[in-house]
Image: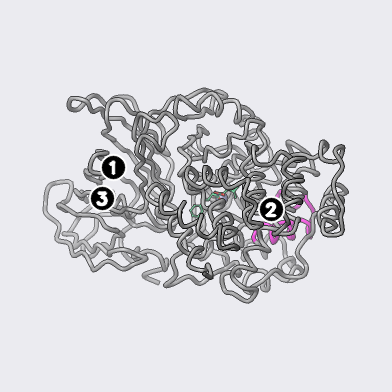
Amino acid sequence: MPRPDPHSYFDSDQPRTTHLDLDLAVDFDRRRVAGQVMLVLDRPSSGPLDLDSKGLVIASVRTDLGRTISYEPAPEEPILGSRLRLMLPEGTERVVIAYETGPDAIGLQWLEPPQTAGGRHPFMFTQFQPIHARTMIPCQDSPLVRVTYHAAVTIPESLTAVMSAGPKDGGASSETGMRTMLFEMPQAIPTYLIALAVGDLTSRDLSPRARVWAEPATVEAAAWEFAGVEQMILAAERMFGPYEWDRYDMLVLPPSFPYGGMENPRLTFLTPTLLAGDRSLVDVVCHELAHSWTGNLVTNATMDHFWLNEGFTVWAERRILEALHGPEAAAVSWAIGRVALDESVARFGADSPYTVLRTHLEGVDPDDVYSSVPYEKGSLFVGLLERTVGRARFDDFIRAYIRRFHFTSVTTEQLMAFVDQQLPGVAAKVGADEWLHEPGVPANAPAFRSASLEEITALAAGWPAGARPSATQIAGWSPAELLVYLQHLPRELDRAACGWLDERLHLTGRGNYEILVEWLTIALGSDFEPVFGRARDVLTKVGRMKYLRPLYGALGRHARTRALAREIFAAAAPTYHTLSRRVVESVMEKYDG
Ligand code: BES
Ligand code: ZN
């Protein structure tokens, strides 16, 4: 199989890259990254080497000894980009490519000072998963290929660069006003885990192996919010084995970051919307941390096996949560996830191929079909295996799986062969084929119940008949329980009902974005004017796609809110990440009227 990954030109008959040496300058004025990369190959080679590239402007390709290498860039394909075919002369072990990034590299976002917390310095960050490393680096951009890397990054002197790597001593001011920072990543990772951010950054230590990076204006809040991270790492190590990445640092990005978190090794990227002020959203940190085992050690072979990354990680996240906060808290998290899953299945349609776990995405842009399915259907399948064999046996299985496949990339078929070997008969017993290959959610999906969940969902279901939570009930809810309550309320309420909710539950002023956005989704869908100002603030500032989708969706229900949506989007679109902009456009295309 010469091209095993439908989202890459990587050819498995050709040599593989084992190491990248990057020497890059970050040019904020031109919004370009320019410099060179040296690719170290696994063997002396000759003949064709196909690389992924997207929008890159190639200046030259040579061997490390200075011999020119002829190359042929193919026309740009909309999803894959351009295949860069090099013709290696006999005995080539290292290839040096000089290049710069294109003007709309989707893997990079450039922010003007007003889009940052401090407001005085520009900011840039990368987001390479699933297939965007090729917009900054010509490389074999498939998770089937793992590389170590070194980087020298030249930036304006007043800023700081951080990467998904360790720092390396040295570096200096190269020219006036600029400085070069050095990084070294000794563990082999897929290219989607290479990450860079540059801005006015400072850090606080949280434990001997963990610190948080953020702008000076947010770093104290971030240090407080994530102070418990070492406890999470210890809990995860007890379940999944030693943490293999040396440090676990976190970076809090500006609010336009399109995700909640991204598991860049040694440096998780996080949205500032997690800074709720009460540590109620640290489950996202549990999730990204859990990827240190499921995802970064054992990686999906291609995006057709993405559920292996996310399904196992959501399951692991909830196990960490249970270890730290008990089974009730975990059950609430499962309940919240189930609502998200049902919403995604409803959006695609219950017989859509995008509700299958093991997908076939050739010709499909993985960003276009991103949803809760791999996360929640995937984690339910893992949870079902766990329930079926019992926790003790399943925990042994997980540790064996991680040990067996660490630092490799696996397919669904490889996982299931390992399941058959370690847990014979279990796949058939749970109906694994239906789970993996059929759309929708199988009837034997585990349900996670608790007394308090029953009470909350019953109260919400009783809303139309006049049921209301008492002040005592409300006071007893955790933020996650309040979220469950809101999730189960009708999507459209009258003015009096909206007013009642906001008054009793103090929703519009919430710092917890999960609660705030769920509330705004109901209120905007109800054409409830008192929240319009708050909604405008959120939508102008926050680029997290998980929030933009429901909010713009809710704004589509009424003529007045559709006009509001168009007005807000016109103003905010230039500040959104390309991915966020695309999500909003796809939502607004479906507005009728
Ligand atoms: N790896 C994902 C984010 C991602 C997936 C980026 C696919 C690009 C392509 C990350 O671990 C993630 O799942 N983030 C979630 C966190 C949540 C499930 C706790 C998010 O951003 O909402
Ligand atoms: Zn994840």
Highlighted range, magenta: 378-396
Find out whether the residues at labels 2 and 1 contact each other: C-beta distance under 8 Å. no
Residue most extreme to the left? 67
Q: Secondary structure at mark 3?
A: loop
Callout 3 environment at 10 Å: few (<14), some (14 to 19), or many (20+)? many
Residue drawn at the location 18% of the way across and 65% of the way down = 72
Which residue has dot 1 on it?
21
Which image quarter: residue 339? bottom right
Mark carried by residue 101? 3
User: Is residue 60 located in the magenta-colored stretch of the structure?
Assistant: no
Answer left or right for 309 relative to 424.
left
Residue most extreme to the bottom? 351
Looking at the image, is mark 2 or mark 3 earlier in the sequence? 3
Looking at the image, is mark 2 or mark 1 earlier in the sequence? 1
Which residue has dot 2 on it?
397
> Disc 1 versus disc 3: distance between alpha carbons?
17 Å
